[in-house]
Every structure is written in C-alpha cells, then in structure tokens.
Amino acid sequence: MTLWSRLQRRIGDLAGELVLDDYRDQLSQAEALVRAGDIRSGIDVLEALLTAKPDHGQALILLGDARMQLQDPERAREAFERALKLRAGDPAALVGHGMALVTLGRYELAIGSLARAVAEAGGDREILADAYRGLGVAWRRRNDLDKAIRELRKAVTENGNDLEARASLGEALVADGGSMDEALRHLERAAAAPRPPVVALYALGRIALLEDAPAIAGERLAKARELAEEDTTPLGAQRRLDITVAQGDAALVQGDSMRAHAFYLEALQAAARRPDLHAKIAAAHRASDNLEAALSSFDRALALGAGVEVLRAAVDTAIAARDTTRSLQWGSDLLGKDPNDGRALVARGIAMIESQPDGARALLEVAAARDDVDAHVELARLALATNPGSAADSARAALRVDPHHAGARQLLTDARAAIYGAPGTEIADLAKFVEHTVESRRELGHLVGEVARAAANLDQPLLVTVMGEFSSGKSSFVNAFIGADVAPTGITPTTATINVVRYGRERGGRIVGRDGVTVELGWDALMSHLRALTPAAALAIDRVEILVPLPQLEKINIVDTPGLNSIQPEHEATARAFIAKADAVIWVFTAAQGGKASEKKALRSIHDEGKRVLGVLNKADQLSPAETEEVVSFIGGELGDLVEAIVPFAARDALDWKRALPAKPAESAKPAEPAEPAESAEPAGPAGPSELAQPAEPAKPAKPAKPAKSAKSAKSAQTATAATAAMTDGNWDALSSALETRFFQQARQLKRDACARTLRSVTTEAQRLVDAVRRRAISASEAAAAARNELVASARAFTDEAVLVERKALSDETSLLYRRAAREVLDLVRPRRLPFSSHTATEADRDYLIALLQSGFDSAIEDGRRRVAEDLRARSRLAESAARTLGAVIGADVIGDLQRAAEDRIGLALSRVFDRTRAYLRGYLEGGYVEAFFRNDVPRLELSEDAVYHALVRGAPDLDRELGDPLARAATDALTTLARRLEHWAAVVDVQAFDLEVGVSRALELAAARI
Ligand SMILES: Nc1nc2c(ncn2[C@@H]2O[C@H](COP(=O)(O)OP(=O)(O)O)[C@@H](O)[C@H]2O)c(=O)[nH]1
Ligand SMILES: [Mg+2]
C-alpha cells in the first residue's frame, strides 16, 4: 500500500494546480473504491473520468496502479505510458512504468524507466525505495548479482519495512553464495510476515538445500509454490519456474529421482531451451541409473551451450557408461577448457584403451595418482589378465576411495581368484596350493613351514614310530626287524634316548644335541657311547640317528622311542614331534602287562590324530599258546578299535633266528627287488612276505608249520598265536606279513594320508584365523555403525537440549549485564534541573557504556564458547572406542584422524557461531544502539533502574536469533562430519573383510573341498 499512500499525497499536492473540482470528486471516489478492495469499480470510475478527460495524468497513474493490483501489468504499462506522455518526468509515473515492465519480464526497458525515476525522485524516499527495489529485481533476473545486491541494499535502507525488498536482497545474497548471515537476517524477517513474499520462502528453501536439509527445503518450496500460483504475471511465472527447479533439486537430494525428473520436465515446458534444465534432467536420469537417457540429455544441454560444470558432469557420466565416443569427445572438450582436469584424463584414457592401451594406461596412471576411482578401476581391468597382483592393488585403491564401488569389488574378486588359482588334484599340487595360500597372508605365515614339511615328507621314507611301555622290547623289536643289533637294548629309563634308525652309506651314527650340536660317530664308538650314557648326558640329547646301510631303510625309517612312562620332560617335545610325523605306529605290549590304562590313554590320543597302529605282543616266548591267546583277546577287548591288530611276537627269538640264517643279513643282503613295496600303494592281491621286511631271509628254512604266512588281518594274526610258542622265528613271519600288508604296501597312501591330515589341520586353522580376522573386522564395522548412530542422535539432542540451555544462559547473562548497565547509567547521567529540561550525559559517558556492554557481551560469548566446546568435545568422544577398534583392525591411526577432524570441525563451528555473534554485536553497539539510547531515551528517562533497564532492553540486539539456529546448525555439522568419517573408516574395514572373503577364504575353501 505504500504506492497507494504516495499517490494520495501527490494527488493532494497537485490538486490546487491541475485538478478541476468536477474530476476531483470522481478521483476521490475511485480512490476510495480501490482502497476498499473494489478495484474493478474503481477502474470503471477512472475509465469514465478518462473518457471525459483523456489527459488527466493523475487518473492515469491511479489507473495504472489499480491495474497492477489486478495483476494486469500490460494494461498498467499502457496507463503509465499515457501518463508519461502528459508528464514526461513524473517520478510516480516512471516508477509505475518501470514496475509494470519488471512484472512483464521486460527488464532492459524497466531498468531505463526506473533509473530515470531515481534521477527524478528529488529525494522522495518512497519513490526511491520502489525504484531501487524494481532495479534490484530487474538486475537479479538478468543475473547481475552485484548490481542487484547493490540496488536492493539501497531499497532496504530507504524503507526497512519493505519485505519484498528484504526478501529479494536475501535471495540475491544466497544466489551470490556470499554472506549467509546477512541473507538470513533479511529472509527470516520477511518470512515472519503473515503473508510472506514468495521470494523469501524460495530463498529459505535454497538455503536449506545448501545446508543439506532437503526435507525442510521441500516444505518451504511447496509453500512458496502455493503462494506463487496466485501470481499470474510473467514475473510470477518466472518465479514459479525457479521454485519448480528448486523442488526438483530438493527431490534429487532426497534420492527421489523420479519426482525430481517430473519437476524438471515441468520446468522444461516453460523453458525448453535452458541448457541447465537439460543438465538437471540428465542428473536425475543418472541418479536413477539410466545412463543412456542421461547421456542424451547431456548431449542436448551441451548443444544448447551449457558451461564447463555441465561438461564435467557429462564426462563423469560418459565414464560411468564407458561410452568411448562421448568420453573421447567430451574429454577432449574439457581438456581444452581445463587441461588439468583429472576426469577428462580418465575419459580419454577409457576411450583409448582399445586402440592405444599403453597411452591409455599412462593417462589413467596420472589420474590414479590423484586417486580418481575410475582410473583405479580401469587400471585394475587393464592389469587383470597379465598381472592380477597389480589388478588387486588397483581395485583396493579404488575401494579405498569408494568402498561400495561394485565394479571395483568384482575386479578384486576376479583378481584374487586369478592370484590364488585353483588347486590341482594331486596331493603334492594341493600342498603347493595351500602353501601359497597361507604364504599370502601375514597372519598365516607361521603355517607355511608345516605345509612345506608335509609336502616334502611325501618323498621321505615311511616313518614308523615304535612306542610302548618301558622295557616292553621296543629296541629289541627294532633290532629284530633290522636283523641286527643296532638299537641298544636293556637301557635304563633314565638313559634312554630317541633313536632314529635310518639309511646310511656306512654304519655309524650322529648324536644331535638339544642345543643343535651334532656329533658324528663310527659304529663302535656310537654303541659304546650310548651304553655309557649318564642320565644327565641323555637329557642333553635331542635324538640319536643310527645309520645302517640296509636297502630297506631307504624307504622306511624307524624311530625307537623311550618307554611311554619314562619319557623325560626334556624329550617330550621331540617325542611328540615324532609321533606327529609318524606315518604309522607300532605299539609294543609286553606279555606280562598289556592293555593298561596308561597305554589306553596314549593309544587314544594317537588314534585321534588319525594314525594307524599295529599292536605287537612281545615276549610271547614267556607265555603258553593258551596264555598268549588269552592276553591277545584281553588286550583286544580293552583297546577295541585303537589298534588294528595284535600280533604275538618274540623279539629276541626273532633276532636270533635271523642271525642264525646262512648269509650275514645286515651287511651283505642284497634283496632281489629292494625297496619297491613302500612305493606300490595298491598291491595286486595279497602279496607274499615282502623282500623289504625280510632282507635277512635269502632262503626260508624249512619250518614244520607256517600258519602265520597267510595272516593278513588281525584275526588271522591272532589265530596264529597258538603256533607261536612252537616257532623258532619268534613269529616273525606272521608279523612281517602284517607289516607288509598294513603298512609297507600302503606306504604311498599312508604318506598321502599324513600329508592330507596336515593340510586339513592347516586349512582348518587358517580358516579359523581368517574368520577371526574377518569377524573382528565385521564387529568393528558394526561398532562403528552404532557409534555413528549415537553421534547423529547426539547431534539431534544437542539441537533439542543444549541449544536451549545456551540460549537461556546467554539471556540470563545479558539480563544481568543490562541491569548493571542500567545502574551505571543512573550513576553517570546528570539529572535535569528543571521539570521541562532534559537529563544529560557526555560523549565519554556514551563510550564508557559501549565499553561496558562490549566487555560484558564478550565475556558472555566466551563463556558460551567454552561450554559449547566442552560439550561438543564430550559428544565427539562417543566415537572413540569404535575408532580404537577400527584402528586396531586396519592398523591405522583412526582415533587420531577422528580427533583431528573433531578439533577442526568444532573449531569451525565455534567460530562460525561465536565469532560472528561477536562481530554482529560490535556492529550493533558501535553502529548506533548506544548512540540512539543516549539521544532518544536518556533525555526524558524516568531515572529508576527498572525504567533504564527496560529502555536498554527495548533496543537491544536479538542475540537469541543470532545464536540459536546457527549454533544448532554448526554443532550438527561438526558431529555429522565425525559420523561420516567414522562411516568412511568402517567402509575401509568392510573392504578388508571383503578382500579376505574373496581372497584367502575362498582359496582355503577350495583347498578344503579337494583334500
Ligand atoms: N623273554 C624275552 N625278553 C625280551 C624279549 N624282547 C626283549 N626282551 C628283554 O626285555 C628287556 C627290555 O628290552 P628292550 O628292548 O630294551 O626294551 P625297551 O625298553 O622297550 O626298548 C631286555 O632285557 C630284553 O632282553 C622277548 O621277546 N622275550
Ligand atoms: Mg629301548
């Protein structure tokens, strides 16, 4: 209504000069009608007047104004133009004309009229205010933000109550991206009106978008849209277009690309050739993964002359679509505009992969050095076939940047599959595969040796470990087996050593000390050394290797262990190692006391390790056949399936028998077919006594009966017992037969089984370790997600609670400050002497009050800053334990990273809020608040503390407004930044877990399935 009151005044001013009384009545009537809202009737009256008096200038101006109110700018313009023909320099007509043109969207012309209005205004502030606002709006629409802001600032200065001008100024400031505080001050004031200007709501919506609050933006924009619908002018249509586009932006940020697309399409109907709208439509397509449609929209946007930012987005999409033609073209265009653009390099790199792979790689490497995710991905793709290790590195680099990149994850999976390969079917190949697999991870490195040994052991002689109670005849068994006195017998428990009987070119031996020192000895020296061992010397020996030049020992090594119940603690580890390595175990029972509980326990654990055990019931010569049978069946009953078979035996007899044979067995025996059985895994049918086991039997002495000769199983071995006592070979024949079929013929299979056992236990252990690492990674990532949620909740709580506390504290402190200031004022003001004179104060008094208030505000602000800093730091510590866990998993200083981020963001938040508030207050205090108080209030003040206090408070700056929302925003920003960092690290950990899963875990699974 300011235009209206202005016209009224001018009509009054000019009435004396120009307006005839006849028309004056009509004019007043029209005026009253328009003011009452009956604009059409007012217009009728004016048109009647103008028919009678076509050159009535004031009537024309009033008509123009009325038509503007009816949203008919075109006909308003006509009226103003007619008025201007009559009164060329009339500022009211000029302003009206300019505003009509602005509303018509004809900004160029409008600027001309409005500039003339300013020149002709002659200091009329209302004219000036309107003209500046019109100019500001026109410049803004022409996208000249500097000029727009300048004119709008003037408009607000001329008329602080012009909310349209404030809204437009705020909007221009937001568009300019500059002073958000100034913008907010104007916008919030304008938006507080009962019918806020559309532009204010629109600009507040844009701010919400900038501040990452698309939902709030959506609400504000919807409201703006509703109000804008009522404006049918061209300017109104353009504003609706702005709002529609912003609504699209809000929908896009909210992830609703379909709705965004619909908004943009709607906007496009009003402005089909705007390149930015095509670019936005492209963005919406891109967001819904419709890359083809996005590329077409970019084509149109670029053809219509879109700028470099759109070109960048287009290049980005071409890369994502792997569209080589557009990548090449747009990449080159972008490089032309910005030779340093990394994305352009990637685009060109992708385009060149087929034709010039080396050039492509070089370009991509430049971009990868800048951590371009697509460059990493393309490099991984390029390397996959030839160098999967480097492909995996590139894929991991990509995942460090974008942990959820599906292509990079697939490439990592493929690269790992290529690196680990697939295991072969042969046990040796399988072992090699497992070895490589465990070698690939630091946390599995300790398993490598075990696998390597298992693999090497495949080619080693069959290792048979002889065990049993002390003095059961183990050493005697070994000697009988060899046919020579090689293992010392009758040794006391304390001087017993672990003796490994193995092949040597010459008889001899070596003593391996527990300190690793090895002593080589000749045969006689070795034997006498062993017999003369003191218990202390025995303890210092790890093992004794007895070397005998017997061909069968090339395929079989025999370990003679001290008695079960006499293993010294010092020997235990070595003994256990030999048991673990043993391909087969011979358990020697004594006729006197077989099947004791201690034996059962030991046999159980050997059985559990998957070793096969053959039982030998030694010293059978001391029993009658019936007793032997009884003992065998007793032991068999006691030990059940722990022993495969129990063969009665007489070691001493067997040795004597072998020695009595014509040829000298140990030294000279050259078996016709040495050493084959151990290698032949599947003998064709039951073989006769093996040459290997019987090197000492060049010819079979004629024996009355050889029932054991056909013994192939436990039962048959057992049924042979009846004859044992009568036999002079100590039942060697039966025993050798059992050994042959059970162990030697299956040597190869036993070796494979042993290796498979190791591989199985290693892969199980490796899987356990890898799973533990993965589980740790997953639980760290879960802890991070929980901490992230806590941070977000804490940010919300800060907004809900802490901000209120801060506001209250600040308002309490400032009340106290004003009270103090009021008392000071009472002190320093010189009261009037006479009833009608004034109170007075000096300039120094004024400066003193400014200083007092300033230091009071400063300390209130400092207190607030300290409290908020402490509060935010405490809240940021919610991330600490999750950060520690994450850091431990990936071996990075996650805590440090988060602490630095927290300090940075909190510092930024605090200065954004408190430094600004302080600056605002300074401006307020020095810019006239105290001045105005002394000038306007002090002279007539009632001199009481309350009265002074209220006078001070009345004009005081609105700190609440300055502090509240910005504080909530800044704190939320600081805490959500932390939450995002945490998310990032959690994603990094997640990638690690993923890498383990598709790498070593999958390889171990493949191996486990093959073993
Ligand atoms: N009667 C009899 N005594 C045996 C037989 N085998 C070993 N011995 C004796 O049992 C004792 C312990 O034998 P040895 O082989 O040293 O037992 P180890 O401690 O188990 O090695 C020695 O005195 C042997 O002579 C056997 O078959 N019959
Ligand atoms: Mg012994």
Image: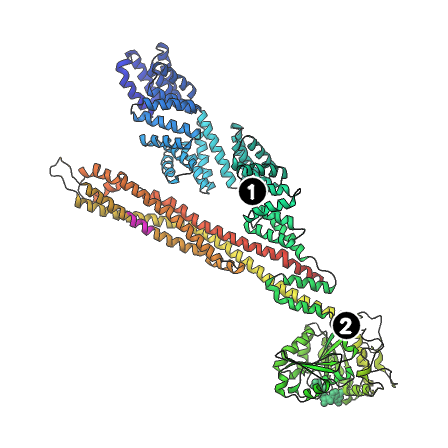
Residue closer to the observer: 347 or 962: 347
Residue segment shown in magenta = 857-864
Split into quadrants, the picture shows ligand 2 in the one at bottom right
Taking the image as shown, residue 855 lies to the left or right of residue 453, namely left
The residue carrying mark 2 is: 747
Prevailing secondary structure of the magenta residues? helix
**Quadrant where the C terminus is found in the figure:** bottom right
Q: Nearer the viewer, mark 1 or mark 2?
A: 1
The residue carrying mark 1 is: 343
Residue closer to the observer: 347 or 931: 347
Compared to 554, does 201 lie above or below? above
x, y percentage for residue 730? 80, 86
Compared to 238, does 934 lie above or below? below
Amino acid type of the residue that numbered disc 1 sits on in the rendered structure: Arg
The quarter holding residue 525 reads bottom right
x, y percentage for residue 601? 66, 78
Q: Is residue 861 magenta?
A: yes
